[in-house]
Image (cartoon, grey):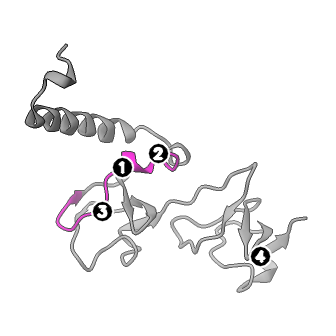
Amino acid sequence: MTNIKDMTPEEIIAMARTFRQFIEEHAELLDDETALTVPTAFPEWTDGSKYKIGDRVRYDGEFYKVLQEHTSQTDWTPADAPSLFALVLVVEEDEPTEWKQPDSTNAYMSGDIVLFNGVKYMSLINNNVWSPAAYPAGWQRVI
């Protein structure tokens, strides 16, 4: 094996690109919860990229899963195209995560606990897409 100190910058860049491709190919095997711990293993969303169902991308500080195969374009960003992308939401059993607006593809389920305005709430219904403020009957404050 060649010592990196003996390599040219071009060789180092080529090796880094190969390593990056390896990481991205194997990151696809991770479940959403694990993937959220290593988001930089996934590519940033880019205009003109071909995405297949299940691909995951980073966009504007968030992590999204592709719902439909497509080629991206500027007006179909993950934040603006809920038919193409779902925000990846993972509910931790030990430590609740901050409530984020879900949609029909990633709603909170009965028993999910979140933080909303600094207060813990548990969803009382499945497919809950409302905040505790918008639909108080769908949530119970957890003490």
Q: Say which element carries label 3.
A: loop
Mark 4: amino acid: Gly
Callout 4–callout 1 Cβ contact below 8 Å: no
Residue 87 appears left or right of 124? left
Mark with earlier residue (2, 3): 2
**CA gap, disc 1 and disc 2:** 8 Å
The residue identified by callout 4 is 138
Instruction: Give residue 19's position: percent from left, percent from top.
Output: 25, 34
Instruction: Give residue 67's position: percent from left, percent from top.
Output: 38, 61
Quadrant housing residue 2: top left
Which is more toward the observer, 82 or 11?
11
Mark 3: amino acid: Trp
From the image, state whether disc 4 or disc 2 is nearer to you.
2
Q: Quadrant of the C terminus?
A: bottom right
Which is more toward the observer, 29 or 11?
11
Determine which of the numbered discs, if any, sits on residue 45 in the image. 3
Residue 49 sits inside the magenta stretch: yes
Residue 39 appears left or right of 120? left
Residue 124 sits inside the magenta stretch: no
The residue identified by callout 1 is 42
Q: Say which element carries label 4.
A: helix
Determine which of the numbered discs, if any, sits on residue 38 in the image. 2
Callout 4–callout 2 Cβ contact below 8 Å: no
Density class for disc 4 (Cα within 10 Å; few <14, some 14-19, many ≥20) is: some
